[in-house]
Amino acid sequence: MTGCLIDDNMTTALIAEPIRQSWVESSIEFELAPGLDAETVGQRSGCALVGSVDACLLADRFTVITDVALASWHAGAVALWTPVRPDEIDNVPVVLNGVSRTAEAIARATIARFFGITITGWERGESNGDAVVREHEGAFFEEVEPATLNDLVRSWFVLSGLPVATHLLVAPTALLEEEPNEVASVVEALKSAGSVGVSRRREIRRNMHTQFPGDRDQLVMFHNEQTLTLTKTVRKGWLDLIRRVGRAMNLPLPETVSFHTFGAADESGQPDVADS
């Protein structure tokens, strides 16, 4: 039976936490891997739930499975920190230290267009600056004025009217062709985990909230806004994002990405019913 890597962070918690806590039974060998990237996935022979920009980098050997994904709509876990209001700074480099390629893509697609900031460079080697991209827990910290933290996923939605696919499920194309039932088993196990995660997301949030001093209301909104499949609308948003930043980030053309669907996709594409 093939295994599956999962990028382990708060953005994937609705799927990762039920697996970590053994709330679902499965014969699939899951591995929770914080900071999972395309290079690590490429060295393995199994499936992976990986950041969506890293998924694009794997297009020559992997196929995107649309049945499982993580998408954010009006609220997300990628934010821009500034020491003052964003309209009060200009001509600054953007600090990307420690954030994923997907967070970088969202930042590249929004900061200049949404805030009108002239960007002088993109820095991964620095940790301090006047424009710092934060991700996961860091995107939920409560800042003391005049510092601000602005949700870049929301900025993307305002600019595009589309959601952001933060994570995609990829399978080796050769495995999908030779052993489709093995990939289908991974898909079903992940869907089961996601279903349990949605039904127990209050419990997941309680566990998460003890780990960082973030804003609980923002965390509730974030989870309520997440959807767990790559619908046509989510795919459109992802492809638009890749096209906008592809040249700057040296990404493959989105036309080179292959997609496969096992079950009928839910094309409603809207976030689930809210809870608190």
Image (cartoon, rainbow, N blue to C red):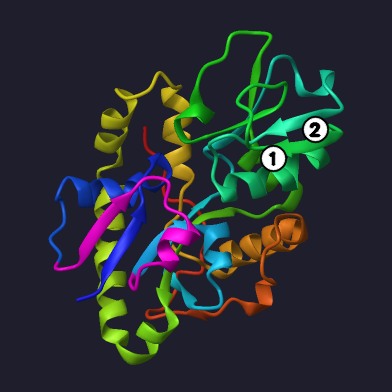
- Quadrant of the image occupied by residue 99: top right
What element does badge 2 sit on?
Answer: helix
Residues at marks 1 and 2 touching, judged by CB atoms closer than 8 Å: yes
65 vs 160: above or below: below
**Residue 193 visible (yes or no):** yes
- Quarter of the image where the C terminus is located: top left
Which of 59/208 is in front? 59
Any magenta on residue 38? Answer: yes
Give the residue drawn at x 58%, y 50%.
Answer: 102
Q: Is residue 189 left or right of residue 110?
A: left
Q: Position of residue 33 (x, y in %)?
A: 33, 50
Mark 2 nearby-residue class (10 Å; few <14, some 14–19, many ≥20): some
Q: Write down the region rendered in magenta.
A: 27-46
What number is the disc on residue 115? Answer: 2
Q: Earlier in the sequence, mark 1 or mark 2?
A: 2
Give the residue drawn at x 27%, y 85%.
Answer: 181
Q: Position of residue 141 (x, y in %)?
A: 50, 21
Q: Is residue 167 left or right of residue 24?
A: right
